Amino acid sequence: MATNSSVKNNLQKSNGNNAPANTQGTSLKALLESPTVKKRFEENLGKRSSQFMTSILNLYNSEKMLKKCDPMSVISSAMVAATMDLPVDKNLGYAYIVPYGNTATFQIGYKGLIQLALRTGQYRNINVIEVHEGELQKWDKLTEEMEIDFEAKESDKVIGYAGFFELINGFRKTVYWSKEQIEAHKNKFSKSGFGWKNDWDAMAKKTVIRNMLSKWGILSIDMQTAYSEEAKEPKERREINGESLDAEYTEIEEGPDPLEESSEPPVEEPKQENKDDSQKDLPFD
């Protein structure tokens, strides 16, 4: 298995440079043009690799905070998305490359989770929606009976989020998180807050659907990989096809994962005694 140094040396040789490789001082464009990196993307995306690498460069050039990150960490994060065949265009919402200090990290979007779930062929239906003021008529956590009257909407104010899936075998699951639960969850576990600042609604939907799938859904290998990648410290990078695309990263303060180490979201009323284990979550931001 290749180490950080061996990959850097491969990049160095491919560029015909005898000086020590230093990805921190190498531009993202130069790294993307290196044979070693090109080969990795081609192995995962085939003919679409060129288009995917162009999207990485466009994203990098459009994000001021991302430009402060080690270029190799941007590539490593993009590689994770490439192995799952998820675009990193932030406007699509399937996967994101998120800056954390001087390191870029991979983050899957709620649309990406739904996409990976549908690819398993095990889901008949899967969705997550916002619930507006006046729409929720009934919610029973025990029986999961929910009544939503969309015609009874009183305003555009969002009061919560509902998630649902049905498997091919007929198994169904419905969950509901109030906006207060999600907000308390974010405040307690989000460290960087990058995703929440940019799209609170998308992050709320991800909180609901990620929890629901991780507890009751059927997870493919790609889905398990997405979960584990988000649980890693930013300095950790995934081994791709036996070779790491790591650069050497700056140590960061230990603590909850920047992609949000999750747990049971707080209930709205502290006096409630029965905690709902269904709303425990896994790390992400």
Image (tube, helix red, strand yellow):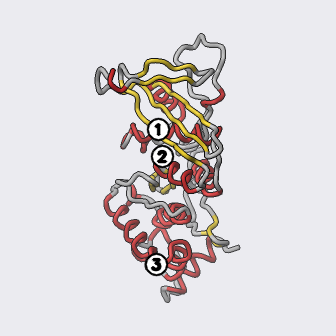
Q: Position of residue 29 (x, y in %)?
A: 39, 74
Please give the name of the residue rendered at 44% of the width and 59% of the height, measured from the top-left corner. Answer: 69
Apparent side of residue 212 relative to residue 135 in the rendered image (left or right): right
Q: CA distance from mark 1 to mark 2?
A: 9 Å
- Label 3's element? helix
- Mark 1 vs 2, N-terminal side: 2
The quarter in which the N terminus is drawn is: bottom right
> Where is residue 142, by image quadrant?
top right
Q: Please determine whether, in this image, residue 228 is positioned above or below residue 186.
A: below
For the residues bearing labels 2 and 3, Cβ distance under 8 angstroms: no
Kindly report the distance in space between the C-alpha atoms of the residues bearing marks 1 and 3: 33 Å
What residue do we see at 57% from left, 64% from top? Answer: 248
Amino acid identity at mark 3: Lys
Horizontal and vertical percent position of residue 80: 55, 62
Mark 2 residue crowding within 10 angstroms, few (<14) / some (14–19) / many (20+): many
Is 73 in front, or is 195?
195
- In the displayed orientation, state which residue is furthest to the left: 155
Location of residue 206 in the rendering, given as x and y in whole percent from the top left corner: 49, 41
Query: Helix, strand or loop at disc 2?
Result: helix
In terms of sequence position, does the residue under pointer 2 or pointer 3 come before the other?
A: 3
Q: Nearer the viewer, mark 1 or mark 2?
A: 1
Picture layout, residue 34 above or below residue 61: below
Report if residue 28 is visible in the image. Answer: no
Q: Residue at x 67, y 74 (%)?
A: 2
Q: Is residue 4 above or below residue 118?
A: below
Seen from the viewer's position, the closer of residues 171 and 89 is: 171
- The residue pinned by badge 2 equals 110
Q: Are marks 1 and 2 in contact (CB under 8 Å)?
A: yes
Location of mark 3 (residue): 47
Residue at numbered disc 1: 128
